[in-house]
Amino acid sequence: MPLAVAITGTRSTGHHGLSWYADLFETFLGPFSRDDAHFYIGGAVGIDSLTLLWLAGNSGSRITVVTPGTVEQQPAEARQVIARCGDRIMEITELGAAALGTPAYHARNQWMVDHAAMVIGFPLQGPEGSSGTWQTINYAASQGKPRLIVPV
């Protein structure tokens, strides 16, 4: 049975090197990155861009990038990663929000959870907070969906 996975995570990733994230993703995304799997990834910087790069280079899984507005509204670094992985991205879903604030990002996160069977979350290490990552994980819990939480 195909597996649909939403990925959520912090934008603050500079406290670890790229090889640390590669090892982390090998361990925690690798088992789910089958050829029949489908990943929904936000089009932002941080975990979104890092997981997009890793999945594009290390799996045959289908990838959908989801943005709250348009790709053009995303930071330059995120747009570059999306362009670099373009041949591996199955679909880009632009939700068309006029303003990119907290409500638009929460709507994007809920859209991804609603289309997924499970969520893999990469929040910042520490206590649970009110970040978008935790909002997404908690929304998945309210929907009865499995969550794998991997603090970074």
Image (cartoon, helix red, strand yellow):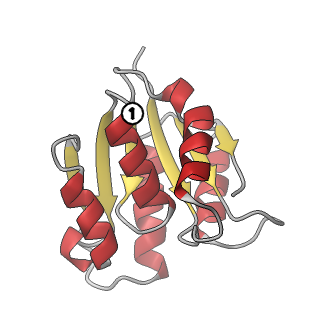
- Around disc 1, counting alpha carbons within 10 Å, would you say few (fewer than 14), some (14 to 19), or many (20 or more)? some
At x 58%, y 60%, the residue is 17
In the rendered image, the quadrant that contains the C terminus is bottom right
Residue at 39%, 67% in the rendered image: 44
Q: Position of residue 136 (x, y in %)?
A: 58, 58
Residue furthest left as drawn: 87
The answer to whether 133 appears left or right of 51 in the picture is right
* The residue positioned farthest toward the top in the image shown: 1
The image quarter containing residue 74 is bottom left
The image quadrant where one finds the N terminus is top left
Residue tagged by mark 1? 58
Rendered location of residue 62, percent (x, y)? 30, 33
Horizontal and vertical percent position of residue 150: 69, 48
Q: Residue at horizontal 24%, vertical 50%? A: 85
Q: What residue is at 43 percent from the left and 84 percent from the top?
A: 101
The front one of 96 and 120 is: 120
Looking at the image, residue 3 lies above or below residue 147: above
Does residue 8 lie above or below 128 as drawn? above
Amino acid at dot 1 = Asn
Quarter holding residue 77: bottom left
Element on which disc 1 rests: helix
Mark yes or no: residue 74 visible: no
Residue 132, above or below 76: above
In the depicted view, which residue is nearer to us: 112 or 91?
91
| Residue 2 seen in this snapshot | yes
Is residue 116 rendered to the left or right of residue 72?
Answer: right
Residue situated in front as seen by the camera: 4 or 60: 60
Q: Is residue 16 left or right of residue 58?
A: right
